[in-house]
Image: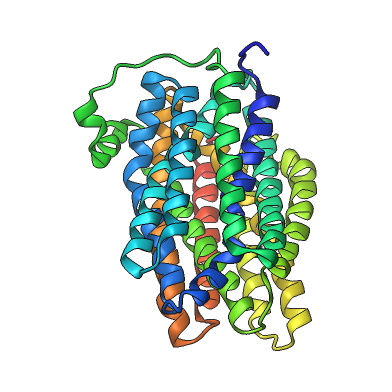
Amino acid sequence: MKRRASIPIVLVLMFFQLMASNMVHPVTPTFFKDLSMPTYLFGAAFAAMAVTQFLFCPFWGRMGDSVGRVRVLVFSTLGYAVGQLAFLLSGSVPTILLARMLSGLFAAGTTVNFMAYIADVSPAGQLGRNMSVCAAVTSAGTAAGYLVGGVIGDLSVHGTFLAQIAILCTVAAGIGLLLRDGPAYQKQPLALKRAANPFSAFLEARGLLTPKVCVFLFVVFASCFATTSYDNSFNYYIKDQFGFPPSYNGLIYAVVGLIGLIVNFTLGLRIQRRENCRGPLAIILALSGFTLLSSLALSQIAPFIALNMLFYVFSSMYLPLQQALIIREGKEGNGQISGVFSSVRAMGMIAGSLTAGFFYGIFPRLPLLVSACAFLLAGLVCQIGAVHKKAKGGK
């Protein structure tokens, strides 16, 4: 098949990459318990991965701008597979943390360059729509990963890792054989020494980091912090407190992912068509916080799970809006602004995962409470920014 710039093909490959990336999540609590690891490790391990994502997102963004999105996607997908193999073979806290850092280093490459690739390929006026479709694929791929990983995990935890690695290698081959860089891609010169410095990317992007953008990036940080703290603690919580097998975790995420897919293809697309979608974004973040906060008042398993599933529906909608808004601010150099955006999200992942790991030991529902408060704060700041922009006549 001829290589070409194609949104449908990249979305299919992105779906399977995301599915593979999420397959291990439902079995990680069981994996750690089988190794008799301390409780805090589930948060610390994710934080280790997020640290290298933060450090290398700008690097991979500029590498994509320089050598091409497709090359970086192939290399980083294969590297992520190697990192997961190292995770599988780990047997101690230090080796687990090192393996997660290796995975995070390469995961940064796929996160940044899938987003930049879609921006490069999107025709004028269709970026918002394609970001919504991208978010729907993200939701579906994540749900499929949890479901497939959970079902395989009931049979074999190690089998889940091996299946994940095989799919990642297959996706890397598909990217290399089927895709070429998009028409909007423009090769940019690369100074390797400066590219290797994660903080230089922020300095070079300072022209884009206006006060308005910085406020928005705080919203990105707070919402990602909340999501990460929630995901890590909820995943461990239902295993630790309710004794759910990996397949139960997978089924919950699969149902939520299907609902999220429908919501993003309907309501999400309608919101994306608005000139200013900061107001709806603020409402979505606030609803996420209120729903999660309400679930903490419930003690019975069924209502608690049901309200958390409703929370997932709301929280699945905010990321495509944030992606579309930040790309609109980029003006040029989709890789650069995508790298900054992804690094800020990685900072939220670091803080959120550490909060989940260490606060869980104090009280199992404490990370969920902190997540709810962070969503409410993000919604408030976003609403203030939206009102300020409207008052100044901005779109």
Q: Residue placed at 66% from the left, 52% from the top? A: 145
Relative to 379, residue 167 above or below: above
Q: Which of the 4 quarters of the picture holds residue 359? A: bottom left
Q: Residue placed at 54% from the left, 61% from the top? A: 227
In this view of the protein, which residue sits in the foreground, 147 or 140?
147
Residue 9, visible in the rendered structure: yes
Q: How is the image coloured?
A: rainbow
Q: Residue placed at 66% from the left, 24% from the top? A: 7
In this view of the protein, which residue sits in the foreground, 307 or 279?
307
Q: Name the quadrant of the N terminus.
A: top right
Q: Name the quadrant of the C terminus.
A: top right
Q: Residue placed at 59% from the left, 70% from the top? A: 235
Residue 215, visible in the rendered structure: no
In this view of the protein, which residue sits in the foreground, 281 or 223?
223
Q: Which of the 4 quarters of the picture holds residue 287? A: bottom right
Relative to 339, residue 373 above or below: below
Q: Position of residue 81 (x, y in %)?
A: 49, 44
Q: Residue furthest left?
A: 193
Q: How many marks can you see? A: 0
Relative to 29, residue 209 above or below: above
Q: Position of residue 24 (x, y in %)?
A: 57, 58
Left or right, 228 with reference to 248:
left
Q: Position of residue 115 (x, y in %)?
A: 53, 34
Q: Which of the 4 quarters of the picture holds residue 376? A: bottom right
